[in-house]
Image (cartoon, rainbow, N blue to C red):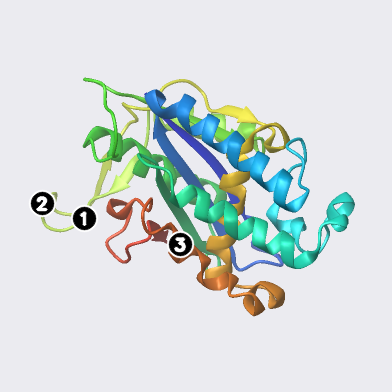
Amino acid sequence: MYLMYVDESGDTGLVNSPTRYFILTGIVFHELRWTNILSDLVAFRKSLRDSKGLKLREEIHAKDFINKPGALMRIQRNDRVDILKKCIVWLNSQSDVSVFSIVVDKQGKTGDIFELAWNALIMRFENTIRYKNFPGPQNADDRGIVFSDNTDGAKLTKLIRKMRHYNTIPNTGNLYGGGYRNMRLQYLIEDPIMRDSANSLMHQIADVTAYMIRQKYEPNAYMKKKAGQTMYKKLEDVALKVASKNNDFGLVEL
């Protein structure tokens, strides 16, 4: 079984939205690696506690972490940036982990951005399982399950249920002669499991990753000053390269 932890950066709005891009990031690993990865993540958070004063129970929420830290104001701003960077370095150090992101440029689009992004993310997950392209241990016949940050959970559940029965995908090239195919989900089981990121260390890592990916496309002034727009390159060892033909960082640009 493959587990995919998903979080987002930006928003799906098309009217008066403060963001041009909407990012979904998936962190994927096999069930047989779950215990070791969790143990290593807890050890990493303990190291942040000891070196930066960030308690394990305190949430890393990247959007507010720099400019609206609330109680975390006690940690110096440059140390808060360093925490975000260390999260990326930690993720890149994990063996048998895959990271990929859907990057939606909302400019000029009129459809449902939420469905566009999630459909692309789920199909990359589905097809990578189907073709056995994830690294690390495998079972003879694997499936996948989604753990999502609890935002628009009902809408996501409805979308995945629909994709199990009706999921039209445009044909490409001359192989199918144009038109569409109904690519129903075969490898994704159950409804998505919703988690509050405040209680999920892995979702906090996914949140930071999505935020750092977004800095590539629309960096804020302070993060640009701290070279935040290049931090996504630190994911080169875990990037799911098969997710996109256009780059080596698992960035699917729509």
Task: Identify the secondary structure beneath mark 3.
Answer: helix
Q: Is residue 93 above or below residue 110?
A: above
Q: Position of residue 4 (x, y in %)?
A: 46, 35
Confirm whether residue 107 shows in the render.
Answer: no
Confirm whether residue 231 shows in the render.
Answer: yes
Q: Circle 2 sits on which residue? A: 175
Camera-side residue of 83 and 125:
83
Q: Which quadrant: the C terminus?
A: bottom left
Sequence-wise, the earlier of marks 3 and 2 is 2
The residue positioned 59% from the left and 42% from the top of the image is 44
The amino acid type of the residue labelled 1 equals Thr
* Contact, mark 2 vs mark 1 (Cβ under 8 Å): yes
Examine the image and state in which quarter residue 98 appears.
top left
Q: Position of residue 232 (x, y in %)?
A: 48, 63
Task: Identify the secondary structure beneath mark 2.
Answer: loop
Label 3 crowd bin: few (<14), some (14–19), many (20+), radius 10 Å:
some
* Contact, mark 3 vs mark 2 (Cβ under 8 Å): no
Task: Identify the secondary structure beneath mark 1.
Answer: loop
Question: Viewed as shown, does residue 148 lie left or right of 131?
Answer: right
Q: Circle 1 sits on which residue? A: 172
The amino acid type of the residue labelled 2 equals Leu
Question: Viewed as shown, does residue 118 lie left or right of 205?
Answer: left
Distance from disc 3 to disc 2, alpha carbons, whole Å, reads 37 Å
The residue positioned 28% from the left and 39% from the top of the image is 135
The amino acid type of the residue labelled 3 equals Lys
Residue 234 disc label: 3
Camera-side residue of 90 and 60:
90
The residue positioned 63% from the left and 57% from the top of the image is 84
Q: Is residue 198 above or below residue 144?
A: below
The residue positioned 77% from the left and 57% from the top of the image is 64
Distance from disc 2 to disc 1, alpha carbons, whole Å, reads 7 Å
